Amino acid sequence: MSREYSITYTAENTYEHAVNDAHWQFLIIPEQNNSQDFIGVTFENSLNAMIEYSINGYGFKTIRIHPKINFHKITFTASFQLIKKDINPFSFDPDPDISKSYSTIDELNFKVDFDSFLRITHFTTLPKSNTPLFSFDTSNSIFENLKALNEWTFMHIYFKANVTDVETTLDEIIEKRHGVCQDFTHLFCALARENGIPTRYVSGYLHQGNGYFGDSQMHAWAEAYVPTIGWIGFDPTNNLMANTNHIKVAHGKDYKDCAPLKGVLYTTGRNETKHTVKVASQQQQQ
């Protein structure tokens, strides 16, 4: 069974003084993969600036905008359609040899192959402590430990909007124990990597019809690599395995690699940005 999703992304930027020059890059187009059949995209801006499509360093599609006129306000509207197969996040065989999998993640070749997603980054740096926040129990499989970490992160942080921003680091998150999806994901990634598991920060959309936690923009979750199984999605904000309602856009080492909007602007004074995302879904007729 498959579901058809329609996603509408809007952004409105207002500036106190005229913008003399601006360059934007949007990373908001859903990925085409084995479970997501991308149908199409429409993208418009209120200045009718030229739109260019390109591929970033991780291989994901981006939209680039460079207005040729001065302005005080610009709005962007994007619409995406895709079909997604129903996902059973547990559709794999259990690890047949737990000890071998732990030996694998300690091998030099494994660490070299997955170096990018084992690295400590600015946003996945844990506070210095003599006591680890979360240690794997090697009598259990790597997958079972990741499920436990997913639940631990969900229980350790309370979802609360507008108390953190895109620059907030784990020191503050761990101390205040409040945050949004990117904070949950950074903590999960940091602790999984500390235990030797390659982990990717994932940005995308979440169909929230089932009352999931998330914000009004884009959602974030993690993908961890488990030997003998492969990459598996974990949503610590909701204590879920990533499923049919998780629509992937991109992945990277942390938020910086996956920011939905990056820009360089030449202006002064105050500015205000508003974003909204709406995700609608319907079952496909067979």
Image (cartoon, rainbow, N blue to C red):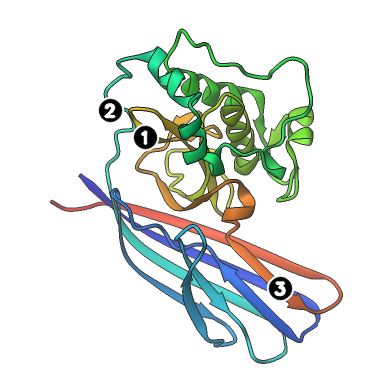
Front one among 129 and 167: 129
Q: Could you tell me residue 163's position as x and y percent? A: 75, 42
Disc 1 from disc 3: Cα separation: 37 Å
Q: Could you tell me residue 110's position as x and y percent? A: 46, 33
Q: Three-letter amino acid code at disc 1?
A: Gly
> Comparing marks 1 and 3, which lies closer to the viewer?
1
Front one among 253 and 163: 253
Eyeballing the image, is 70 above or below 126? below
Eyeballing the image, is 83 above or below 264? above
**Residue at (72, 90) in percent of width and height:** 70
Count of numbered labels shown in the rendering? 3
Q: Residue furthest right?
A: 269
**Residue at (78, 20) in percent of width and height:** 129
Query: Quick check: 238 left or right of 17?
Result: left
Q: Earlier in the sequence, mark 2 or mark 1?
A: 2
Mark sitting on residue 185: none
> In the structure shown, which secondary structural element does the residue marked by tag 2 occupy?
loop
> In the structure shown, which secondary structural element does the residue marked by tag 1 occupy?
strand
Disc 2 from disc 3: Cα separation: 44 Å
Residue at the spot of label 1: 230
Q: Could you tell me residue 243's position as x and y percent? A: 37, 38
Q: Could you tell me residue 36's position as x and y percent? A: 31, 53
**Contact flag, marks 2 and 1 (Cβ < 8 Å):** yes
Query: Quick check: 160 left or right of 152?
Result: right
Mark sitting on residue 92: 2
Front one among 168 and 154: 168
In what quadrant of the picture does the N terminus appear?
Answer: top left
> In the structure shown, which secondary structural element does the residue marked by tag 3 occupy?
strand
Residue at the spot of label 3: 264
Q: Residues within 10 Å of mark 3 (few under 14, many from 20)?
A: few
Q: Residues within 10 Å of mark 1 (few under 14, many from 20)?
A: few
